Amino acid sequence: MKLSILLLLFILMSSSVVLGGKSIPLDFDERDSYTVAMFKSDRIFFEYDNDVHSIILDEVLSTRVEFDIFIYQNTKFNKENPNYAFLDTVHTLRLDMERDNIHDFEIKLNDFDTDRGSAIVEFSKISIPKIGDDIDLDDEDIKEDIDDNGEVFYRSTGFFTVIGVIIVLIIIISLIDSVIKRRKETYY
C-alpha cells in the first residue's frame, strides 16, 4: 500500500505542469537580428558588455504587450531593474545599454495574440545615435529623416508651422460650413 502511494506521488510530481516560461538565449556575436515567438513569461537573454541582460514578456494586453527589462543584472548599474516597457506594432523600443547616447538594441513587435498570450518579437543589434544628439550624417539609416540644417524634419519649426496652418484652415472651413448649413436650413 505504501509503495503504491509513493509511486502515485512520484508520477504526480514528475508529470506536473510548470507554468514558468522558457529561456531563449540570443548570441548577437553570431547574428545581428533574431525574430522570436514568445509566450507570456518567456525570457530572452543575451550577453553584452560583459554582462547578461534579460527581457521577459510579462503581459499581452488588447492593444500592446508589456516587457520586463533587466539590464546589467550582475553589476553595480542594476539599481533601476526591472524597467517596464510597453510596445505595440507601430512603435519600436530602442535600448542604450552603455549610456553613451547611441542606441545599441532595437525591439520590434511584429504581431501578438491576446487569446494565446503570445507575441512575435524582433530583437536587433543596432548602432543609431539618439535623436537630438550629435548625429553622424554618414549613417544612411537616419540620413533620410534629416534636413539640410541637420535637424530631424518633425522637430523643426517649419514642420510645426505647417501643422499649425493646416489646423487653422480646418477650423475656418468647418466654421464656414456650419454658417452655410444654417442659412440653408432657415425656413420662412
Image (cartoon, grey):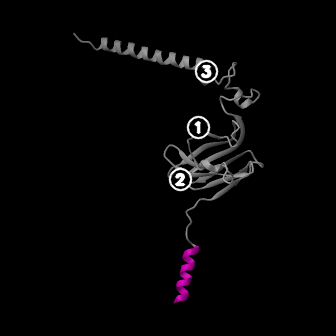
Q: What's the amino acid at mark 2?
A: Gly
The residues colored magenta run: 1-14
First along the sequence among labels 3 and 2: 2
> Please, is residue 104 above or below residue 51 in the view?
above
Q: Position of residue 132 (x, y in %)?
A: 65, 28
Q: What's the amino acid at mark 1?
A: His
Front position in the image: 30 or 71? 71
Front position in the image: 181 or 83? 83
Residue, far top: 188
Residue 15 placement, left or right of 169: right
Which residue bears the numbered disc 2?
117
Mark 1 and mark 3 in contact? Answer it, CB < 8 Å: no
In the image, what residue occupies the spot 53% across and 44% down? 64
In the picture, which quadrant includes the C terminus? top left
> Please, is residue 70 above or below residue 171 in the view?
below
First along the sequence among labels 1 and 3: 1
The disc placed on residue 122 is none
The disc placed on residue 91 is 1
User: Is label 1 in a helix, a strand or a loop?
Assistant: loop
> Please, is residue 146 above or below residue 9 in the view?
above
Q: What's the amino acid at mark 3?
A: Ser
Residue 32 placement, left or right of 82: right
The disc placed on residue 156 is 3
